């Protein structure tokens, strides 16, 4: 099928593009390279590139022409970035998504698969988290992702456009770089590779559900192919580990011993996180398959190649 990946130059988007091309799909990418990298797309010259902003109505209209499914990943990503730049966060995540939805319904797109986040839930009341857990986001990012979801699901009710929102928990894998807004695995991994000490926010007993990017790619493709399915679904590995245990796993995966210090907890960070993934399993057969030890070995090997 012919597909559009917004945010295809980013971490998750570029892994999705690689998988789609391997499955002989025709792939277009729309990206402004604000947090994505040209080098992520360099191995794929066959991709049709629409360079620009996801809020640019005429560019998005061109990009969706003749497309059967849109994977919408372009976003201002992360809690910290949204606390630093709340208006930009809402503009890209809310207006950007509406721009994609409008263009998609006008172009007769069959399916939109949008990347949402576990950040919509806020602090957790019950574990593991089911889709009907209360949504009380702690950050502008969580709020903008929740708003984005509601828009997608409203369009699915109003128009002949199926919409699936995938609420990712903590995704990790190749092409996930270290930057000021990075997630914990790249931050720790790149410091370890440089022989630098790491700082654990809080006492390290907080837990996260880490899901490998290959499993997230699988969720996107299965959601796109499932006929007649709309809704919002949790996408995690379905288990959780403490940050202290993550450090131990990273040391085993890399063979590097690291010095860890403890710092103050970060504002907006939840204490515990773990997805109940049974709804995605039932709706479109989502079944995560990458064990953490294998995923971390692969990640550390990739990170060692990044200059
Ligand atoms: N990485 C995670 O753990 C995680 C967790 C939950 C949700 N998500 C969601 O998954 C999606 C992909 O995230 P990622 O981790 O790959 O981040 P990323 O920053 O690597 O990718 C985002 C991509 O969107 C592009 N982009 C940003 N603003 C744009 C704009 N205005 N116009 C066009 N392109 C724009 C960036 O250049 C980048 O290529 C995002 O929607 C994010 O919110 C990620």
Image (cartoon, rainbow, N blue to C red):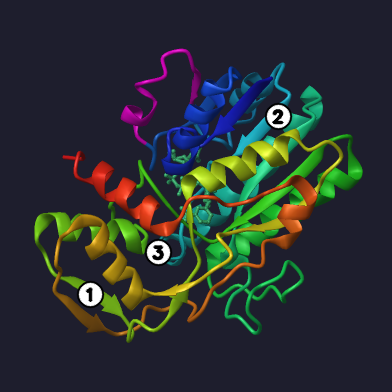
Q: Residue at x 72, y 47 (%)?
A: 285
**CA–CA distance between discs 2 and 1?**
41 Å
Task: Locate the N terminus by quadrant.
Answer: top right
User: Which residue corresponds to mark 1?
Assistant: 199
Q: Earlier in the sequence, mark 2 or mark 3?
A: 2
Which label number is shown at residue 69?
Answer: 2
Q: Residue 51: give x, y in percent of width and height.
A: 47, 25
For residue 226, side relative to residue 29 (left or right): right
Badge 3: residue crowd in 10 Å (few <14, some 14–19, many ≥20):
few
Disc with the residue nearer the chain's start (3 vs 1):
3
**Tag 1: Cα neighbours inside 10 Å, few (<14), some, or many (≥20)?**
some
Quadrant occupied by the C terminus: top left
Relative to 250, say whether 31 is above or below: above
Residue ID for mark 3: 84
Which secondary structure, mark 3?
Answer: helix
Figure check: 26 above or below 215: above
Can residue 194 be seen? yes
Residue that appears at 34% across and 28% down: 38
Q: Is residue 73 visible?
A: no
Kindly state the secondary structure of the residue where label 2 is placed. Answer: strand
Q: Is residue 235 left or right of residue 34?
A: right
At x 41% / y 14%, what residue is drawn? 45
At x 32%, y 77%, the residue is: 244
Mark 3 or mark 1, which is nearer to you? 1
Question: Marks 3 and 2: in contact by CB < 8 Å?
Answer: no
Q: Residue 65, located in which quarter of the rendered image?
A: top right
Q: Nearer the viewer, mark 2 or mark 3?
A: 2
The span shown in magenta is 37-51
Is residue 1 in the magenta section?
Answer: no
Q: Position of residue 56 (x, y in %)?
A: 58, 32
Rendered view: 224 above or below 187: above
On residue 166, which mark appears?
none
């Amino acid at each position: 099928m012919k597909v559009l990946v917004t945010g295809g130059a980013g971490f998750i988007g570029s892994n999705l593009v690689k998988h789609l091309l391997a499955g002989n799909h025709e792939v277009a990418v729309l990206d402004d390279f604000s947090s994505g990298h040209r080098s992520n797309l360099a191995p794929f010259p066959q991709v049709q590139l629409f360079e620009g902003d996801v809020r640019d109505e005429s560019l998005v209209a061109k990009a969706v022409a003749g497309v059967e499914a849109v994977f919408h990943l372009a976003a201002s990503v992360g809690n910290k970035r949204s606390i630093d730049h709340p208006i930009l966060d809402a503009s890209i995540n809310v207006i950007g998504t509406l721009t994609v939805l409008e263009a998609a319904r006008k172009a007769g797109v069959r399916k939109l698969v949008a990347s949402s986040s576990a950040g919509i839930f806020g602090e957790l009341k019950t574990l593991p988290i089911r889709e009907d857990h209360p949504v009380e986001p702690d950050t502008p990012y969580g709020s903008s992702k929740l708003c984005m979801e509601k828009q997608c699901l409203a369009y699915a009710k109003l128009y002949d456009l199926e919409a699936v929102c995938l609420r990712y928990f903590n995704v990790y894998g190749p092409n996930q770089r270290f930057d000021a807004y990075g997630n914990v695995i790249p931050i720790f991994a790149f410091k370890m590779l440089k022989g630098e000490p790491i700082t654990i926010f809080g006492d390290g007993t907080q837990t996260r559900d880490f899901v490998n990017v290959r499993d997230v790619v699988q969720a996107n493709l299965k959601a796109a192919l499932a006929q007649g399915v709309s809704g919002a679904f949790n996408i995690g590995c379905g288990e959780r580990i403490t940050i202290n245990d993550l450090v131990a796993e990273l040391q085993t995966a890399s063979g590097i011993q690291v010095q860890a210090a403890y710092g103050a907890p970060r504002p907006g960070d939840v204490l515990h996180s773990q997805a109940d993934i049974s709804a995605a399993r039932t709706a479109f057969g989502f079944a995560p398959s990458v064990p953490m030890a294998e995923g971390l070995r692969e990640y550390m090997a990739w990170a060692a190649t990044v200059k």
